[in-house]
């Protein structure tokens, strides 16, 4: 028979999935915030018409990601989730696919250009001295400045995240090792011969000089030019798949 049945598909959700969604809706609709108590398991079970076991499993999921916690004499309360902590667990699982790694790398490109104002507002002489040491070590070890080792790349850019003074940015950078490795292993072919729009490769030394003598805007431009091969690769992938 070629007749197509006009019937709604079965939702691909378990009862626990549905309870989890309903609990989150309850939190949002009641404008609850961190520190507020939520109903007990039995109350949720009665209101939703499900077993206490189903509710317990749904709440356990929320507890695992840090949205709720059990407090003595208060029962279950809402807590502020550790977003970076949850992200860290995913990163350390080594289960991230290539598309996810590429997306995270694109986020890194945006962050490193966007943190310029923070860097100029919070840099210190000690920070500059540390970057100078990193760059000097790099220059002493490498003849071809367009190809750099993974350790030196992490050291330089990691220090920039540290200078930003933003704890979330700093923790995010600490998780980027798999992303740095992904980029290092998937650089443009013949990266050393890449034709830069400025006519030359912008080195870590150039970026450091901008941080010392330039402005947030000139720093952003330098960082964009430094990362140009990666932008080119990302954008070419987007164009070719579009």
Image (cartoon, rainbow, N blue to C red):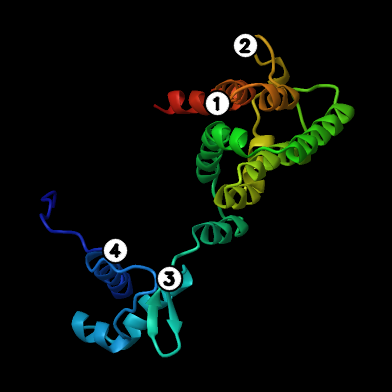
Mark positioned earlier in the residue sequence (1 or 2): 2
Determine the CA span between mark 2 and mark 3.
49 Å
Crowding near the residue tagged with mark 1, few <14, some 14–19, many ≥20 C-alpha atoms within 10 Å: some
Determine the CA span between mark 3 and mark 4.
29 Å
Query: In the image, what residue occupies the spot 44% across and 23% down?
Result: 239
Mark positioned earlier in the residue sequence (2 or 4): 4
Task: Point out the residue furthest to the right here.
Answer: 140
Element type at mark 1: helix
Tell me if I can see residue 185 in this picture: no
Determine the CA span between mark 1 and mark 2.
14 Å
Which one is closest to the eye, mark 1 or mark 2?
A: 2
Query: In the image, what residue occupies the spot 39% across and 26% down?
Result: 242
Which one is closest to the eye, mark 2 or mark 4?
A: 2
Examine the rendered structure and indicate whether residue 160 appears above or below residue 66.
above
Mark positioned earlier in the residue sequence (1 or 4): 4
Say whether residue 88 is left or right of residue 147: left
Question: Residue at label 3?
Answer: 79
Q: Residue 59 location in percent, x, y?
A: 38, 77
Determine the CA span between mark 2 and mark 4.
52 Å
Say whether residue 63 is left or right of residue 17: right
Quadrant in the rendering for residue 57 = bottom left
Element type at mark 4: loop
Quadrant in the rendering for residue 49 = bottom left
Residue contact at pointers 1 and 4, CB within 8 angstroms: no
Question: Residue at label 4?
Answer: 12
Q: Residue 93 location in percent, x, y?
A: 60, 60
Question: Which disc is residue 231 wearing?
Answer: 1
Which one is closest to the eye, mark 1 or mark 4?
A: 1
Question: Residue at label 2?
Answer: 198
Task: Point out the residue furthest to the top here.
Answer: 199
Residue contact at pointers 3 and 4, CB within 8 angstroms: no
């Amino acid at each position: 028979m070629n007749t197509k049945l006009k019937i709604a598909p079965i939702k691909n959700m378990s009862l626990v999935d549905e309870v989890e969604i309903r609990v989150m809706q309850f939190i949002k609709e009641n404008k609850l915030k961190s520190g507020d108590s939520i109903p007990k398991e039995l109350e949720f079970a009665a209101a939703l018409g499900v077993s206490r076991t189903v509710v317990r499993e749904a709440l356990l999921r929320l507890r695992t990601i840090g949205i709720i916690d059990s407090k003595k004499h208060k029962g279950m309360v809402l807590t502020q989730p550790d977003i970076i902590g949850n992200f860290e667990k995913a990163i350390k699982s080594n289960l991230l696919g290539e598309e996810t790694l590429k997306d995270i790398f694109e986020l890194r490109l945006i962050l490193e250009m966007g943190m310029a104002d923070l860097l100029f507002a919070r840099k210190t002489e000690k920070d500059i001295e540390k970057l100078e040491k990193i760059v000097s070590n790099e220059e002493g070890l490498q003849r071809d400045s367009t190809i750099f080792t993974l350790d030196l790349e992490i050291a330089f850019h990691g220090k920039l995240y540290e200078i930003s003074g933003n704890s979330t940015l700093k923790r995010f950078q600490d998780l980027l090792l798999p992303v740095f490795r992904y980029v290092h292993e998937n650089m443009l072919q013949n990266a050393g011969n890449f034709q830069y729009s400025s006519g030359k490769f912008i080195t870590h030394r150039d970026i450091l000089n901008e941080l010392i003598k330039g402005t947030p805007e000139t720093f952003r431009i330098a960082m964009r030019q430094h990362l140009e091969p990666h932008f080119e690769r990302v954008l070419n992938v987007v164009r070719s798949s579009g």
